[in-house]
Amino acid sequence: MSWHMVKLYTADIIAVQETHLTIEQEYAFKLYSQNYNIFFSHGTSQATGVFMAIHRNHGLSVVLHQAVNAHIQYLDILYNETNYQIINLYAPTVVDKRKQCYAELKQLIITDSTFVLGDFNSVQAASDRISGKLDGTSKDLSCLIEDTNVVECIHDMMFTFQSLGDPTKQSCLDLILGPKQAMVEVYQYQSWTSLSDHSLVVVHQKMMVDRGPGQWHFPEDALEDDKLMPKISQLLQSELHTDSISMHWEMLKLEI
């Protein structure tokens, strides 16, 4: 799937798996990304690697980026005074390593505003694969979803993977998971090309509703807290971690 095609959607958040980029190529990619801030979790030129792109002009502030390993990364994002955790996953193709990856992912899903985007390299049900076969981690994937209290945001699923060498091999490997209370509409765009064996999945997330400008009020009774006030004073004197004053202020409010 070409980067140009992805950018046509002017999406808020873009998650890409199995990047196969070197550090030098990643740097060049950032220069080409235009309206997006790019966050990489490094793989190699031969395998793995994931990245997320956040649109610079859509009001999303990245508070934290954590590259867990070559298969998992996550962003803590602030949007309209609400915190979201976005996890990008590329699960290994080897069963044992995929089981371990799912276990690591399970430890990361700790909030009711966590979304997981990625290639799980497994299916939950026989109907998710054209051959009707489950695999060695199908049960693990189902347990992961149930234990973390998330749901699939994609309904009436179409196959998202098709083998370039054998078009009869199709399955639903690419999932988007989110909190049960999220109101999500998902539209899938499919385009099998020589560049990728995965289709592009486009999600319209109605949970993030613009609330318009507002004011942040610090509780006055907290001024009498002898332990809290010195810590706030230290935060206010800390150096800027971003070129944006407004983003720095949002990060300070989050820490307070």
Image: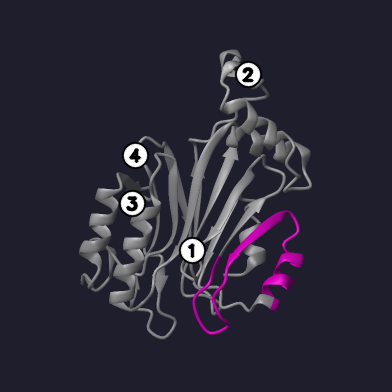
Quadrant position of residue 36: bottom right
Residue 32: image x %, image y %? 75, 66
User: Which residue in the protein does label 2 denote?
Assistant: 217
| Residue 157 located left or right of residue 19 | left
Question: What residue is shown at x 56% (from left), y 27% (from top)?
Answer: 227
Give the numbered dot on residue 156: 3
Question: What residue is shown at x 33% (from left), y 71% (from top)?
Answer: 98
Q: Using a 10 Å C-alpha cutoff, classify the residue at mark 4 as few (fewer than 14 neighbours), some (14 to 19) or many (20 or more).
A: some
Which tag, 3 or 1, sits closer to the chain's start? 1
Label 4 – label 2 distance at C-alpha: 30 Å
Quadrant position of residue 29: bottom right
Question: What residue is shown at x 65% (from left), y 36% (from top)?
Answer: 252
Of the two numbered discs 3 and 1 in the rendering, the one whose residue sits closer to the viewer: 1
* Viewer-nearest residue: 190 or 202: 202
Of the two numbered discs 4 and 2 in the rendering, the one whose residue sits closer to the viewer: 2
Which tag, 4 or 2, sits closer to the chain's start? 4
Label 3 – label 4 distance at C-alpha: 17 Å
Give amino acid for label 4: Lys
Give amino acid for label 2: His
Asked if residue 172 shows in the view, the reply is: no
Within the magenta stretch, is there residue 167?
A: no
Residue 73: image x %, image y %? 50, 60
Which tag, 3 or 4, sits closer to the chain's start? 3
| Residue 49 located left or right of residue 251 | left
Give amino acid for label 1: Val
